[in-house]
Every structure is written in C-alpha cells, then in structure tokens.
Amino acid sequence: QVQLVESGGGLVQPGGSLRLSCAASGSIGSINAMGWYRQAPGKGREVVALVPTGGSTIYTDSVKGRFAISRDNAKNTMYLQMNSLKPEDTAVYYCYMNIRLSWGTTNDYWGQGTQVTVSS
C-alpha cells in the first residue's frame, strides 16, 4: 500500500549537520500528520518533531533552534534538517506519517529507521 523510505543518516562530528529524508510511495491520497521520532540505546522512542494535522510544528525542547522539519508535497517527501548536532542526538531516527490512502482508509506508517551517530 504505502512505504516510507528514509535516507541521510550517518556519522558526524559534534557541531555538524545532517539532513534526513523520508519519501512516501504507494496509493497516497493525502498526508495528514507527519513527524520524526528517535530511539537512543537503552531508551524508549521519543518524538523529535511533529506536524499535527492542520496544526503547528512541535519540537521537543532539546532540539528547538537546531532542528527543522520541512516537506515537499509534490514529492511526498519530508525532511529533518539537523544542525549543531550533539553526542546526545545519537539515536536511530524514524519518520512517521498518517496517510489517507487513495480509497479513503487512513493509517499510520513508519520508516525503517536510520542511524545518526554524533561523535568525534
């Protein structure tokens, strides 16, 4: 039905930048809510940035002013620009979209996860 494919993770030094991408493909009618989550070793999954349906973007306090979420509607793609990265940003990052399929059903979808490691 729908697949989310992430790219852009990797190893970066503290203070560096990365941009994650999440491309949705399949029988997409419309994309409602979308966001990025992360899970660090030994910790639960936490929201990083979330764009609720019809609402304003929400960022977790630890990334405010450093991370920015954006979207390209024509490409059904979402991005997470991460600047001034810190070692504590190290985690597997997952993209999330709530998508209404072309025949009307609405479901939640997740990307496969991409590793971001911030280390010198």
Image (cartoon, rainbow, N blue to C red):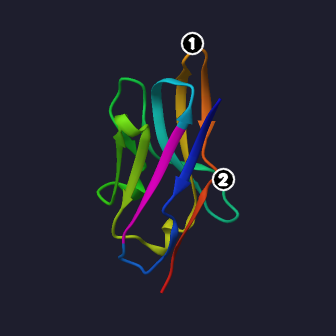
Residue under the point 48% across and 87% down = 120
Q: CA distance from mark 1 to mark 2?
A: 32 Å
Residue under the point 54% across and 68% down = 90
62, 70: nearer the viewer: 70
Amino acid carrying mark 2 in the image:
Gly
Q: Quadrant of residue 16?
A: bottom left
Q: Label 2: which residue?
A: 44
Q: Secondary structure at mark 1?
A: loop
- Horizontal arrangement in the rendering, residue 84 relative to residue 50 (left or right): left
Predominant SS of the magenta segment: strand
Residue under the point 32% across and 32% down = 56
- Horizontal arrangement in the rendering, residue 49 relative to residue 117 (left or right): left
Crowding at mark 1 (Cα within 10 Å: few <14, some 14-19, many 20+):
few
Residue under the point 43% across and 72% down = 86
Q: Position of residue 15 (x, y in %)?
A: 35, 76
Q: Which residues fall within the magenta stretch?
A: 17-24
| Residue 112, above or below 101 | below
| Residue 66, above or below 22 | below
Q: Secondary structure at mark 2?
A: loop
Mark in the foreground, 1 or 2: 1
Q: Label 1: which residue?
A: 104
Residue 63 drawn in magenta: no
Specify the quadrant that holds the N terminus: top right
Residue 18 drawn in magenta: yes
Instruction: Please say if the residues under marks 1 and 2 sit with CB atoms less than 8 Å apart.
Output: no
Amino acid carrying mark 1 in the image:
Gly
